[in-house]
Amino acid sequence: MPVSDSDEEGPSYDTESDISDEQSDLLDSGLSTINEYVEIENWASAEDDTPVLLVLTPSMQFAMYEGHIPHSSIRLAIIKIEAEQRGDRWALGSAVARKLEYLLELTQPYPGDLLNILQFRGPRFKAHQKSATEIVVSDQIYDMNNTLSVDVAINQEFEVANWYAQLHHERSRVTTELSSSTQVTLHAPDVWLWNASLVLQGGALYPGDAELSRSILNPRRFKIELTDEWATMYAIRDSHLDFHMIIAGEHLQNEKFNIQRWYSKMLIQAYQCLEGEVF
């Protein structure tokens, strides 16, 4: 997000373990976060033999993180904690668009990026599903938009990081052979349960939670699994409250569905039933 005040205070975290826990979750997902460029070749100008490397520059001034961010996984963990602290996730939104944002953040930097690209504060990528068939991916640092087909994005063979690296190569003329860590896909239909878990984890305080044990401090609190091969029903498991609930798959694909409010209502109903049995 663009800001003009360079003295703006950075985010506060309860402990450094919050960031390391989030980073550990990324590593547990099976995605390598070591995004090293194996080979960089100079692009030769058509007019002479002088090597030309075009480094893209931001369209405006951005705030920067004060501490050194050595890895994209650390930066992504900080962004996730910031979002949870703001409590700005309540509706499911587009699962495909959110997973695109996640993977693009995780697999940066890209060819032609500034050396300090990971120091820029806040999300770099925003993906908006403007229709049932198209998603617009915005790079907020460079103020660039790219349109992507939903069918292409959810294809098991589509490698989102390599797709964006190629786009960056076309702009910067930096030729880069990326490591295998960028060969990641959305893995539909897992994207729906991944997104639901992320939103449930979005910093809400649920009935029965103690203030100091809210979900933001337990990054592995929610686990969602398919209960059948047709993706019609999902099981939500809350390890913090030891609570299990079944939800219809159609709800997880409804962008406007407020899953945090729904889950709060389910908890209240469960407590009321338990109270009735006791008394």
Image: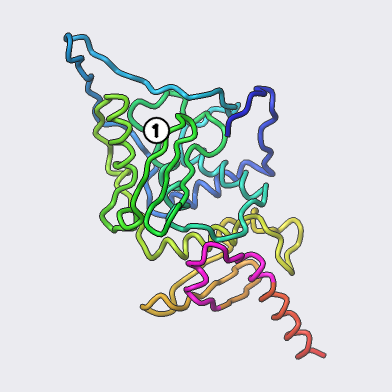
Q: Does the magenta run of residues contain 254?
A: yes
Residue at the (49%, 34%) spot, across then down: 140
Q: As rendered, which of 52 and 31 lies closer to the eye?
A: 52
Q: In the displayed structure, would residue 96 be above or below residue 250? A: above
Residue at the (49%, 59%) spot, across then down: 195
Q: As rendered, which of 125 and 84 lies closer to the eye?
A: 125
Q: Residue 6's spot in the image, x, y percent?
A: 65, 22
Q: How many marks?
A: 1
Q: How is the image coloured?
A: rainbow
Please identify the quarter of the rendering in which residue 62 is found: top right
Please identify the quarter of the rendering in which residue 155 is found: bottom left
Residue at disc 1, secondary structure: loop
Residue at the (51%, 42%) spot, across then down: 76
Query: Mark 1 sits on what residue?
Result: 109
Is residue 44 toward the left or the right of residue 141 in the image? left
Q: As rendered, which of 107 and 6 lies closer to the eye?
A: 6
Q: Residue furthest right?
A: 279
Q: Residue 258's spot in the image, x, y percent?
A: 61, 65
Q: Amino acid at mark 1?
A: Pro
Q: Does the magenta run of residues contain 136?
A: no
Q: In the displayed structure, would residue 21 be above or below residue 222? A: above
Q: Residue 153's spot in the image, x, y percent?
A: 34, 53
Q: As rendered, which of 14 and 201 lies closer to the eye?
A: 201
Circle 1 packing at 10 Å, graded few (<14), some (14-19), many (20+), is many
Q: In the displayed structure, would residue 13 be above or below residue 48? A: below
Is residue 49 toward the left or the right of residue 21 in the image? left
* Highlighted magenta segment, given as a residue range: 246-264
